[in-house]
Each structure stands twice: as structure tokens, then as C-alpha cells.
Image (tube, rainbow, N blue to C red):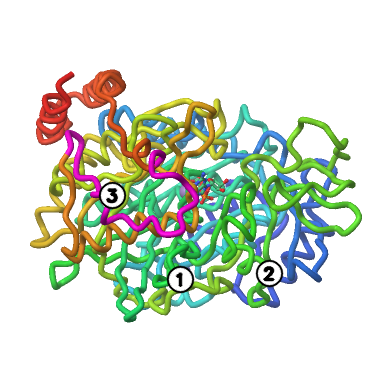
């Protein structure tokens, strides 16, 4: 008798018709074999999947060029397929499940002919955690197989754990022919099933990440009473050794990875990293909110990463522990065969761009793609928290919600209470980035940084957040943060990066009840005397600019929030409306 796992894999084989099926065991020896296959056998267009980079400065480093049309998440081709459209909400594209499956079956038919189908058994979360989930993905490209080995806990142990159960998370993936016209990422949350064809890009193809750990898991969380969020998880240790744990939601390419491994500008604090992208949060038996990071690696934005901005990431990339580290769509220094991206250091003379084409000095074209990324194990990270593998997770004292706003939003604002905090999360807007295909710098609502990742109607999601607060006697405090305000010349006013510790310090002092705060129409802000500005390279007048609330600017914002809330119709919780009305009144606009 075959097991449900074997039957599912046989079904995938019948659909895709690969040349052979290879079951991954997650070992290092196997990773070497997969890299060999990517260098010598598999191709994207005429280029091999992987090319070795200079290992002297960049140990175990490999370059990957994606298909040129396949460089970011494609939200317009991403669907959440509940039985009814209303269950997916205005925040998702929808297709009826039967129709979606019939369409995908056509695209998938024979799509792996002549290729290998890799079977990847993996865990999201530590295997001993009550919150972990056992998963299976099939794919037809070594890049995805190796990336999943870095990003998750992959191995044969997962098959043992699933045993003869029917209850495992299923991900079916093929790069197809990379034709954007035949590219779809389909979610069936009620079956814990994701079907993705036509893309090899992280968020579209590493199905444990955004597809399962956010879209499907957020729906599981709604049914089971927990939260799956697009959030950093980190610990901040003070000089006495006391650690405060926080989570932070920020839209794609808005600073999560940088925050998660921040090197503190204040010498009396140290940051410990638990996760940089995804948090699963449960109310524990003691009534506190606990967070785990279900992932095991970083899939980080390369441009802007340097010894100045994020030294701990450079150390992570140059660490020697885990094989291999992948660099996707970065540039290459032809003389030294080293990876390069904008913001790393001055451009060396002889460069190849992200498509492997010679780059002409002085050219305005980017060398690295703005959404070029590295894939590297969390175990390489020098600031990894000793709690990372704690199956219970860590208790959360504060939740930050950020966005990229060049105007309007202050550096930090504390919510009056949980309900106001949910309002702050729900009304969050952010300027778009290169992490998703489409225009960059356009303001859109991105509540809790989850707009592209919530696997059900966001009206119900806001209600779920309201309800979760009611389960806790002393819920975490909630903060809105914005590192991205600019001056008249378009320059960032706040230095950001390591100096963000100053904002974290104020938050910790608030959590500890050490300092007061000033009440404004939009929430509580610091008294400047309580805000550590020692050695801060900006004038006091700029600090005032960072906290300026201009009612006329807010007028347009309030209109937009209203319109956004209205788009959810009757599913929007009344508390959000009440908070909006209160804010409008207090702003006197
Ligand atoms: P995803 O992986 O897409 O979810 O992105 P992320 O939220 O982890 O963003 P990340 O930390 O990779 O930062 C994205 C970009 O923002 C990089 O180019 C960073 O250099 C830049 N950035 C991060 N933190 C700050 C900051 O405090 N200030 C400024 N000005 N830029 C920042
Ligand atoms: C993001 O876009 O938020 C990322 C990269 O973290 S991806 O995994 O592609 O979603
Ligand atoms: Mn992300």
C-alpha cells in the first residue's frame, strides 16, 4: 500500500511527465550534486542555472541569472481561490477553484518533459515546535531545490513525520517555459495547496515562503486562532542582559532584513536576530503573545547592503558555515569574479550587469537588478538569537508597523490601545518598491504589510486582529514607524539603519513604563527629552521635522483611508470606523 505522500507525488508525475523523479534528503552532499546539475545540465535560455563566484572573499558563492522577465513577484498573476469571491476579498485576485485547477492542469500537462522532478520534504518551523508544519513541494529546477534547502528545514525526517497522514502542505511548482503569459501562482487555502507555474522567482516559486507561510497560513491562523504575518522577529538586549522581543511588519523592500540584524548605534544595546520576513504568532498558555520564525534562511535585497548599512549581513554572506550562498541577478566584477550591486562600494571598472551583459562605465543602466537578492542560511548570521530554535518561540512586548512614506508619517507613533493599533496597521500606506513587478514609488494602502499576502478577505483579517487582542490580558503595544521621510531636496531626513536603535530604545522605555509620551491626534509621540540623540548626525530642527503633523496633508490621507475601508463593505470592523472618525475630529480637518 502506498502512502498519501507517495500517491500525491505519483499524481504530480502523471501530470508533469518528467524524465525522472528525485527525492531530496536535505544533506550537504546532495546540495553539491544539485549545484552540479545547475552548473552542467540545466539551462535557462542558453545560460546555466548557476555559475561559481570567487570563493576567496565570498565563500560558497554562486551566481544565478533568472529569466529576464522573471525578476520579482507578479501580483497580477497571483490568485487566492476560495469557493466564493467574497471570501478572498477585494485584496486578492480570485478564480473559482475548479476553473483554476483546470487551467493549471493544461499548463502543467507534460511541462517537465525531459527534466528532473525534485521532491522536497520540508518543515516550516522547528520540527519540535507545536506550531511547525510539515510540507512537500515538487519542482523542476535546481535553483528552487537548493533555495528551499537554505530557506527551510528540509530533509527525510519530514517524510517520517508525515508518515501515513493525509495532512501535509502541498506545493506543486514548474518553471514551465518562463512565458509571463503562462505564469500563474494559485492558492487553495482550504486544501493547504499551492500550484505555481511559469516563474522561478523566490516569492513565486519557493512555495514555503509567501505562498504557504503567509497566504495559506494566514487562513489557517484565522480558523485556528493565530496570526501569520509579514514581520521581523528580533530580541534587543540591554546592558544588564535583559532582552525585549519585538516583531515588525514592513512592506517588501522597506527595511525588515536591515532591522532584524541592526548593528546598534547605541553601545548599551545589542540586537539578536530571529527572523527577517515572516512571523507566526500564537497566544501561549500564559496569555502572552509568542512568535516563531518559520523560515531558516534570508532571501534578502542586495542593493543597498554594505558594511556601512548592514555589516551583519555582509558577515553572514562571508560566513563559511552553510553550503551554498546564492546571488540572483546581481552584477559581476569580471576581473575578480566577485558579486557586485549598487551601494556595496564604488563600481569597479570591468562589470557585467544582472543579465551577464558587459556594462559600459558611465552608463545609467543598473548593474544589479533593483530586486536582486541573496539566499543565505540564518545559521551563518553572527547575530542569530539563541532562541531561534526554541520551539515555543519568544514572548513579544511590542509590534511595529512600518511603511515607506516620503511625507506625512512621523518617525514613530504609539497607538493609544490595541484597537487603535489595529487601526494604525489597517490604514498603513506605503510607496511601492521593486520587490513586485509594476511601477515603483506609487503610494498604495498596504495594511500590516500584508496586502499581497493575506490569504482571505482583509475585512475578516482586521476583525481577527481585533479578536486576538481580546485574548490577552496585557497585549503588546503597537507602533507605527517610518524611516523614509524626505526633505525639500528629496533626501532622507532620518539616517536610519543602526540609528533606528534610538527609536527601538524609546519603544523599550515605553514598554517598561520608564518614560511618558505626548498625545497627538494620530497617537503618542516621544517627548524629545526622552529620545536619545547623543552623537546623532542631524540637527534638532530636523528631528522636529520628523514628527511634524500637518493637518492639511492628513486631509487627503483620511479620504484615502475612508475609500480603502469602504472597499471591504460590511466586513470592516466598526472599531476601525470609530478610530478613523476620532482621528479626523482630533485633526480638526
Ligand atoms: P523584503 O525582503 O522584500 O521583504 O524586504 P525588507 O523589508 O527585508 O527590506 P530590506 O531590509 O532588504 O531593505 C530594502 C531596502 O531599503 C534596501 O535597499 C535597504 O538599504 C533600504 N533600507 C533599509 N533600512 C533602511 C533605513 O533605515 N533607512 C533607509 N533610508 N533605507 C533603508
Ligand atoms: C518580499 O517581496 O516581501 C520578499 C521577497 O520577501 S519574496 O520572497 O519574493 O516575496
Ligand atoms: Mn518580504
Residue 318, which numbered label?
Answer: 2
Q: Position of residue 209 (x, y in %)?
A: 47, 54
Residue 281 visible to the viewer: yes
**Separation of residues labelled 2 and 3 (CA atoms):** 39 Å
Query: Which residue position is annotated with label 3?
Result: 528
Which numbered mark, 1 or 3, is in the foreground of this view?
A: 3
Mark 3 residue crowding within 10 angstroms, few (<14) / some (14–19) / many (20+):
some
Q: Is residue 67 above or below residue 172?
A: above
Which numbered mark, 2 or 1, is in the foreground of this view?
A: 2
Residue 4 visible to the viewer: no
In the rendered view, does 272 fall on the left or right side of 461?
A: right
**Separation of residues labelled 2 and 1 (CA atoms):** 48 Å
Q: Position of residue 473 (x, y in %)?
A: 8, 62
Q: Which residue is depicted at the point 25% across and 19% down? A: 555
Q: Is residue 2 above or below residue 481?
A: below
Q: Secondary structure at mark 1?
A: loop
Q: Position of residue 194 (x, y in %)?
A: 45, 47
Query: Which residue position is annotated with label 1?
Result: 1
Q: Which residues are magenta?
A: 520-542
Which numbered mark, 2 or 3, is in the foreground of this view?
A: 3
**Separation of residues labelled 1 and 3 (CA atoms):** 70 Å
Amino acid at each position: 500500500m502506498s502512502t498519501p505522500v507517495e500517491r500525491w507525488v505519483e499524481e504530480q508525475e502523471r501530470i508533469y511527465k518528467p524524465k525522472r523523479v528525485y527525492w531530496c534528503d536535505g544533506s550537504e552532499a546532495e546540495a553539491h550534486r544539485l549545484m552540479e546539475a545547475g552548473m552542467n545540465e540545466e539551462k535557462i535560455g542558453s545560460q546555466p542555472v548557476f555559475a561559481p563566484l570567487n570563493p576567496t572573499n565570498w565563500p560558497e558563492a554562486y551566481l544565478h541569472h533568472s529569466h529576464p522577465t522573471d525578476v520579482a513577484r507578479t501580483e497580477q498573476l497571483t490568485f487566492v481561490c476560495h469557493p466564493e469571491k467574497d471570501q478572498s476579498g477585494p485584496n486578492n485576485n480570485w478564480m473559482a477553484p475548479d476553473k483554476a485547477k483546470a487551467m493549471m492542469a493544461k499548463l502543467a500537462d507534460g511541462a517537465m518533459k525531459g527534466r528532473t522532478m525534485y521532491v522536497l520534504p520540508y518543515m516550516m518551523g522547528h520540527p519540535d515546535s507545536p506550531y511547525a508544519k510539515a510540507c512537500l513541494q515538487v519542482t523542476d529546477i535546481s535553483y528552487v531545490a537548493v533555495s528551499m534547502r537554505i530557506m527551510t528545514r528540509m530533509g527525510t525526517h519530514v517524510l517520517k513525520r508525515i508518515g501515513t497522514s493525509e495532512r501535509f502542505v502541498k506545493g506543486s511548482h514548474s518553471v514551465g517555459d518562463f512565458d509571463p503569459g503562462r505564469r500563474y501562482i494559485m492558492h487553495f487555502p482550504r486544501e493547504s495547496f499551492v500550484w505555481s507555474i511559469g516563474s522561478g522567482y523566490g516569492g513565486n516559486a519557493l512555495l514555503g515562503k509567501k505562498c504557504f507561510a503567509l497566504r495559506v497560513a494566514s487562513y489557517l491562523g484565522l480558523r485556528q486562532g493565530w496570526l501569520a504575518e509579514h514581520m521581523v522577529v528580533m530580541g534587543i538586549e540591554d546592558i544588564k542582559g535583559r532582552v525585549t522581543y519585538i516583531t515588525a511588519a514592513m512592506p517588501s523592500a522597506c527595511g525588515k532584513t536591515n532591522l532584524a540584524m541592526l548593528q546598534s548605534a547605541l553601545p548599551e544595546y545589542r540586537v539578536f536576530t530571529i527572523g527577517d520576513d515572516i512571523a507566526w504568532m500564537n497566544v501561549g498558555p500564559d496569555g502572552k503573545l509568542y512568535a516563531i520564525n518559520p523560515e531558516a534562511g534570508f532571501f534578502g535585497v542586495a542593493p543597498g547592503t554594505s558594511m556601512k548599512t548592514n555589516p551583519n549581513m555582509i558577515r553572514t554572506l562571508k560566513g563559511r558555515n552553510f553550503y551554498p550562498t546564492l546571488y540572483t541577478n546581481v552584477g559581476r566584477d569580471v576581473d575578480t569574479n566577485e558579486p557586485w550591486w549598487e551601494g556595496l562600494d564604488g563600481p569597479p571598472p570591468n562589470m557585467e550587469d544582472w543579465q551577464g551583459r558587459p556594462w559600459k562605465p558611465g552608463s545609467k543602466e543598473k548593474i544589479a537588478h533593483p530586486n536582486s537578492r541573496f539566499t543565505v542560511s540564518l545559521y551563518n548570521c553572527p547575530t542569530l538569537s539563541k532562541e531561534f530554535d526554541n520551539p515555543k518561540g519568544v514572548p513579544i512586548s511590542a509590534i511595529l508597523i512600518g511603511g515607506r512614506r516620503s511625507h506625512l508619517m512621523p518617525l514613530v507613533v504609539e497607538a493609544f490601545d490595541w484597537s487603535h493599533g489595529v487601526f494604525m496597521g489597517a490604514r498603513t500606506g506605503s510607496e511601492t518598491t521593486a520587490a513586485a513587478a509594476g511601477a515603483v514609488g506609487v503610494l498604495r494602502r498596504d495594511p500590516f504589510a500584508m496586502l499581497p499576502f493575506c490569504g482571505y478577505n482583509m475585512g475578516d483579517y482586521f476583525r481577527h486582529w481585533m479578536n486576538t487582542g481580546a485574548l490577552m490580558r496585557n497585549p503588546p503595544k503597537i507602533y507605527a514607524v517610518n524611516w523614509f521621510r524626505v526633505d525639500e531636496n528629496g533626501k532622507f531626513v532620518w539616517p536610519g539603519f543602526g540609528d533606528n536603535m534610538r527609536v527601538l530604545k524609546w519603544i523599550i522605555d515605553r514598554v517598561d513604563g520608564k518614560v511618558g509620551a505626548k498625545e497627538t491626534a494620530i497617537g503618542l509621540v516621544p517627548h524629545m527629552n526622552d529620545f536619545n540623540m547623543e552623537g546623532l548626525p542631524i540637527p534638532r530642527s530636523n528631528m522636529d521635522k520628523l514628527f511634524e503633523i500637518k493637518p492639511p496633508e492628513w486631509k487627503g490621507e483620511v479620504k484615502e483611508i475612508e475609500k480603502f475601508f469602504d472597499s471591504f463593505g460590511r466586513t470592516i470592523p466598526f472599531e476601525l470606523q470609530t478610530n478613523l472618525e476620532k482621528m479626523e475630529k482630533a485633526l480638526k480637518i
